[in-house]
Structures are given as structure tokens and as C-alpha cells.
Amino acid sequence: MDHVQVVLSECSVADADTVFNVLRAHFPSDRGAGTPQQTGDSAPKVWTGGFVAAHSPARGPGVLLAGPVTATLQGGPVAVARLREALDAAFVVADLGAASGDQEIESQLRLTRPEHGAPPGNR
């Protein structure tokens, strides 16, 4: 199973767009090229996208975020690992937790920018 569902939360529209752009650079997606849309100020902000991770990503450049992003990845173990590789190359990634099922895993991550120096991909 190569499809991974990605849910981004606790972040700005601009940071959600940055994360989706990094993933779209490596994997086909059901998301168009447009920026995520914000519908109101009072509701929690959550953005979703599906990605087909049929191959390992090429090494990409590091990317800076304005603030932290919570990312939840759900799919087959190999496909989730491939998306994680792309995120590891672009951001500082911390594991917040994981759950495994029969054929799928769910991994929750916190994406941030490095405190000092260049983003991970530029090291």
C-alpha cells in the first residue's frame, strides 16, 4: 500500500503550504498546487492531503517554517517511512507517538526549524 494520508494541524496556512510543497516535490498528490484555504478564525485549522509514496525520495533542500507543525501520517509502513524521509530532509522532526494496525501505521510528528544554522537538507 503506497498511499499515505497526511493531516497537518496546529500551524499557520503558510506553514501547511510549505509542508505540502515539500511532499509534492517528491510524491504525486491528490492536492492541487494551490495554497490551503482558511475558512474562519474560530475553528481549529486542519489540512489534509493524500500522497502516493511508491519510491524513496531524492534528497531535497532544507526548508524553514515560521512555527511548529503537527503532522499525522497514516498508511502502509513502507510508504509512511518514505514520506518521513522527505520530511527528515527538510525539517527537524520529532516523534510524538505512533500506533500500528494490521497493515497500516499512524505516526504523529512535530516539524520545526533548526534553532541554529541551516535546515537539515543543507548540512
Image (cartoon, rainbow, N blue to C red):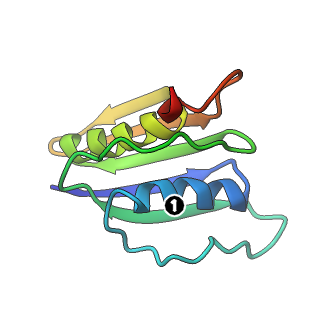
Amino acid beneath label 1: Asn
Measuring 73% from the left and 41% from the top, which residue is drawn there? 67
The image shows a total of numbered marks equal to 1
Q: x and y percent of residue 119 in the render?
A: 58, 33
Residue at screen point 84% across, 66% down = 41
Give 106 or 8, whichever is nearer the viewer: 8
The vertical placement of 31 against 85, above or below, is below
Residue 34 is at least partly visible in this image: yes
Q: Is residue 25 left or right of residue 3?
A: right
- Give the farthest residue toward the top: 116
Q: Residue at x 75, y 44 (%)?
A: 66
Q: Nearer the viewer, residue 97 or 17?
A: 17
Q: Quadrant of the N terminus?
A: bottom left
In the visual, does 51 lie left or right of 53? right
Residue 52 placement, left or right of 62: left
Crowding at dot 1, Cα within 10 Å, few <14 / some 14-19 / many 20+, comes out as some
Residue 19, position as x, y percentages in the image: 54, 53
* Residue 35 x %, y %: 62, 72
Q: List x then y, in percent, for residue 29.
A: 36, 69
**Which residue lies most toward the right here?**
41
- Check disc 1 and report the residue beneath it: 21
**Residue drawn at 70 percent across, 50 percent down:** 11
